[in-house]
Amino acid sequence: MVSLFRQLVWEGTVPIAIKLAPTSLPTSSDRPLDTYFIQAPRISYLPFLIPEIRKNLCDLVLDETSAAALREEDWWFEAENGGVMKWHWPIGLLYDAHLAAASAAESYFPASSSTLTAPMTLLLHLTNPPTDKLLMTPSLETLKSSFMSQSKEADFLRWGSTRRMTGLRKTEQDGLWDGIREHNFDNFWKVASKIFPNPNPLSPSLGSTPPTPNPDGAGGGVTTNDAYAVRSVPLRLFLPDAPAIQDLYPPVTDSGIHITLGDLLTTHLPLLFPNGKGMQSASFPAAYAMVQGIEPPLDAEVGWLGASLAGADGWVNVCVGLRA
Amino acid sequence: MDAEIPDIPEIPDDPASSEPHPSGSRLMVEEHIVYSPTFQVPAFYFTASDESGAPLSLNSIIRSPLFHFPIPLSSLDVQPHKVDLPGSDGSEDAAPVPLLTQGEHPTTGQICWYLHPCETSPAVKELLDHREEPPKGGWELEWLKAWFVVLGRVAYLRSG
């Protein structure tokens, strides 16, 4: 069952529309309004889209001289209503965060036509990247570094050490990255299955004896991969226009109760999610939580989310939005 | 062996302090001490630019007076976007240990360099284990003082 969801996450895509920023168009161009549409994989990253965009948009819009002079390391993306797009965030997160922010704005100021089902429109700039807001040297090496850091942080949160990640041979670590780059599920999971936890079907549920959380070094030589034995599920909560909320999110209480998404949201965002549900009243919009583009039921267990709906870097990204 | 922890040096935890540079030009450095939610320890985040405001390369940064590593620079793996220590078993295939990396500041979202915090806890613990007397101000304060000593081993922390 877990591998079904991992496959669904892997194959998830989001619609993106790319336009060249007006400032990046040479004055000789007579095709300023061309838009290139991409159905981009959620677990991928913006720099991986560049070759395709170059071939299908830039090479058509620009004359030969301009096209040849392009420096891809200067390229950067901007959201249509402003805001620099982060290279190092997975595309699925960029999209869900964009959608949540748009829905929050719209719940207060309903537009005459909904923008919520439209593709995410991005403006592509070809020069002058804002180096304070982006990774300073946007390149595939930088991106890989960032991915590895995130994967190690996820590892550390789960087990209190990065032993599983650092115990991989360099060729295996590279294999994870290559799996993403080539969008190859089997190659990625061949290595990832050594790192990612599995929800143990024998994990006791409500009321019975709890499995003892077993952080590395806390006793015994047994290395567990039980998703319900982690110290904390690597998870971040995203509210529109706010820094990510990151805390320790254990999957099980001291008395052995499996914590649900609703429990977590009520604990950390009690005004938006009182009693484990999105608050709703006639005058106040209801909050919802989105993971990988879907709204998981609020009784979904956090341990299970960590094993099945995490991104390729191990993180469960929860985007909170509002709807009228 | 004397295990006394010295006074805490002054830290500018808000904007730019300028550092003297051998060639006579100035560096603008912005230093932050931020709690890392993942590693649950303080982490040292910073940005560094030259007088014109252009970001400094990592190569320039580690050779500037801001850092004084207790090991030769030649033993570090210095790349444009990160600095690693060699892997622990010394083999070619061993995973490297990160020392300096780029990342988002946890609150401002600004891209900064930071000293990787995963080795911090053991280093601080080692210092605290050598303390002979119980601390006057409580263990949290003592932990933080020891953290500054560990940081001071590699980074220039004095102001003025």
Image (cartoon, coloured by chain):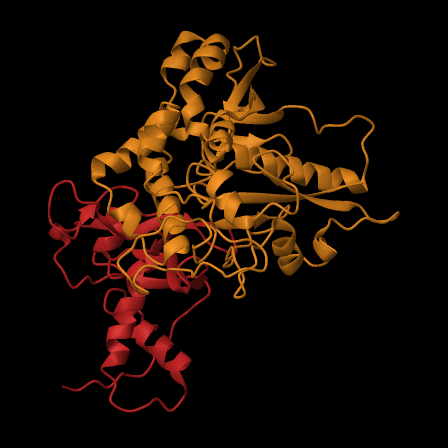
Pick the residue in front: A121 or A232: A232
Left or right of B148? Residue A263 is right
In this rendering, does residue A75 appear at all?
Answer: no
- How many marks do you count on the picture? 0
Chain A drawn in what color? orange
| Residue located 48% across and 35% down the image | A2
Find residue B75 and report its horizontal and vertical position in percent: 12, 52
Q: Image quadrant of residue B147?
A: bottom left
In this rendering, does residue A190 appear at all?
Answer: yes
Left or right of A284? Residue A133 is left
| Residue located 69% across and 37% down the image | A102
Find residue A77 and report its horizontal and vertical position in percent: 51, 30
Does residue B157 lie above or below A227 as drawn? Answer: below
Quarter of the image with the C terminus of chain A in it: top right
Pick the residue in front: A268 or B154: A268
Does residue A125 lie above or below B101 as drawn? Answer: above
Chain B drawn in what color? red
